[in-house]
Image (tube, rainbow, N blue to C red):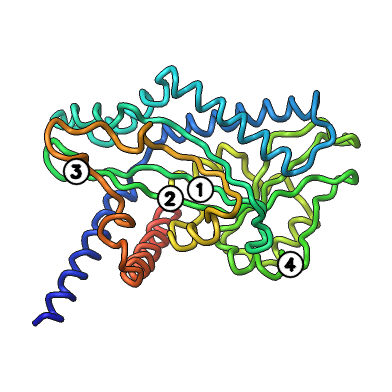
Amino acid sequence: MENNSVYLEKYMEIFHLLTLFERNISMKLPQTLSLISKCWLNAEQRVCKLISTKYHAHNEVTITHLLYGEVKEEFDKINENGTFARVFSKDLFAQFKDRKLADEVSRLSKGIIARISYHEPQMEIISGADFGLAVVRPFFEKIREDRLKYTMQRQGLLCQAKRQQFNGKLGQLTLHQMEVIPKHIAYFALLLYLYRYSDRERKNLLPFAWWHESTCDIDDIIDFLNNFDAEETVSSVDLIHSLGEGNIGTDDQDIINSIICPEELPYILVEITWRDGFPPKPPSGPRSGLSFETKNFENNLNTQKLVHRIIHHRRVQHVKTKTK
């Protein structure tokens, strides 16, 4: 009987998480992610100008540092003038139109900010990438007619930056990269620093381009680098938006913690969160919302992995259905 109760409890936990997934898969923040993408694009344009006027002797690391600083400045502006909170509120009201939730949506929109952080020790040794990129955002579910509960979700991507050379070619993969990248190819992307045609001094940096294909193999990456075609790339706006919606990258928390965003390795973290980490308290009772990683399954790694496999399968099926 004791074993049965344990199995029942675990089943109910898994069922609850799958229910959350089914509800949250359609939880979109289109205006919020568009604003984040716009900030990123504005930052890119300023980085390109800085390269053309000040930082001629630059490399991939220099560009990444400059990008972080410029994105941070953009986020600081929209946080300070309240633009980000207003846009987030519009998305939340569009998702939950019940008038009884109006006060709750207003509460959860207060203090919401966009934040970027950059951690930079040596990563390429382990993963074959230059840095990890992750978007953190809240998902919401209705738990009462006038109350919402939130969970925080991270979506991560491994990024390898390649700078266009004097001859117009892209840099090639090292032997080490060719060995380790195949292990992470489902959540791997190339970030391309390209220049205007015939710019031998490489001062005229173009808007950043990305290449991502979750079903490719290492030969496809090598072929792309050898036969670069700009039509196969996407802009930062498209990539950030897709990552924020969970259409690319991985939501496997083990992979994100150990490969993409470990504390001792470099990564860029873009967060949609509250200024102090939590929303304002509801009218009565404790603050609502903890992600299942920190609440129900803190010491239950096997259950987390089982849930992730089931959720990943459903996500794949959902994406296939949308593309038909």
How far apart marks 3 and 1 lie (CA) works out to 26 Å
Mark nearer the N terminus (2 vs 3): 3
* Circle 4 residue: 176
Q: Looking at the image, do the residues carrying marks 1 and 2 touch, with CB atoms under 8 Å apart?
A: yes
- Figure quadrant of the N terminus: bottom left
Q: Earlier in the sequence, mark 2 or mark 4?
A: 2
Secondary structure under tag 1 reads strand
Task: Please give left or right for residue 266 compared with residue 192 in the image.
Answer: left
Residue 21 visible, this orientation: no
Judging by the rendered image, the residue that carries numbered circle 3 is 142
Please say if the residues under marks 3 and 4 sit with CB atoms less than 8 Å apart: no
Disc 1 + disc 4, Cβ < 8 Å: no
Q: Amino acid at mark 3?
A: Lys
- Disc 4 residue type? His
The mark lying in front, picked from 3 and 1, is 1
Residue 89 placement: quadrant: top left
